[in-house]
Image (cartoon, rainbow, N blue to C red):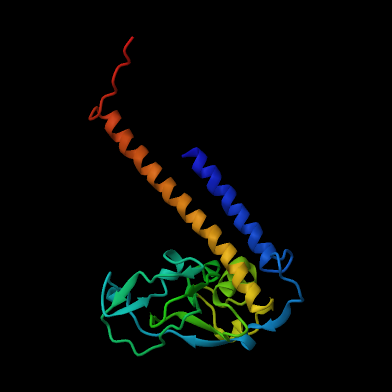
Amino acid sequence: IDSLEQLLTKKRQIKQGAMQELLTGKRRLPGFTGVWSPHLLGEVVAFLKGSGLSKASLQSDGSTPCIHYGQLFTEYGPVINAVLSYTDEDHDGPISQVGDVLMPTSDVTPRGLAKASCVLQRGVALGGDILILRPAESLLHGPFLSYLIRSQPDRILELVTGSTVFHLYGRDMAGYRLGLPSREEQVAVAQVLSEIDTEIDALEFRLTKARALKQAMTQALLTGRIRLVEPTA
């Protein structure tokens, strides 16, 4: 467990460093050169708002895959490859396109709004309190934008309004400044970061399994349900 915790900490530090360098152009991947072009986010995405979809309507199967805004805080990372929930509730709001970037628009803590998840599945019902950033496909790769937003929480905090409940609006995100390399380089950068995330997920799974095993062994050994075998001479 100690070894896995140390390895996980190291891998997260590697990811943080890679995000700071690769998403700003401080370090370039092999084969890519050229100047990054400055943009305002409102120039390269269209903003939409999710609607409807109560938490009570979520289920493990159903007629329509869906995402509730609360899941963006706890269940989804930078890239959503598979949706976890479904609903049979009628939904007349926005439906996802591949590459849409989703952000929660309200929370009781401002830092919670510095979340972004790129959904790679078409036809997903998107619930209320979700800000949908739909990239201009020729200019912007959704996963790249998702990683970029997550790497700069302090800049997102500057756009948040409110005192008790905090909000984030598309009109404010429209002025978010970003530098963009070619779309091909964006795809390559996002792929590198996604591979690191896969390694982190695998380590977290192993750590969770090891902790559960220790807990079970502790309960069994300290209650006498399982007895150790005395070593023979």
Q: Residue at coordinates 67% horizontally, 65% vertically from top-left? A: 22
Q: Quadrant of the C terminus?
A: top left
- Nearest to the observer: residue 80 or residue 87: 80
Residue 210, relative to residue 226: is it above or below?
below
- Nearest to the observer: residue 43 or residue 167: 43
Percent x, y of residue 204: 46, 51
Residue farthest toward the top in the current orientation of the protein = 233
Residue farthest toward the left in the current orientation of the protein = 225
Counting the numbered discs, the total is 0
Q: Residue at coordinates 41% horizontally, 71% vertically from top-left? A: 70
Q: Quadrant of residue 174?
A: bottom right
Q: Quadrant of residue 75?
A: bottom left
Left-right relation of 198 to 126? right
Residue 131, relative to residue 164: is it above or below?
below
Percent x, y of residue 54: 32, 78
Percent x, y of residue 50: 43, 84
Q: Is residue 153 at least partly visible in the picture?
A: no
Q: Is residue 36 at least partly visible in the picture?
A: yes
- Nearest to the observer: residue 177 or residue 168: 177
- Nearest to the observer: residue 205 or residue 107: 205
Residue 63, relative to residue 153: is it above or below?
below
Q: Residue at coordinates 55% horizontally, 70% vertically from top-left? A: 114
Percent x, y of residue 176: 65, 80
Q: Residue at coordinates 30% horizontally, 75% vertically from top-left? A: 86
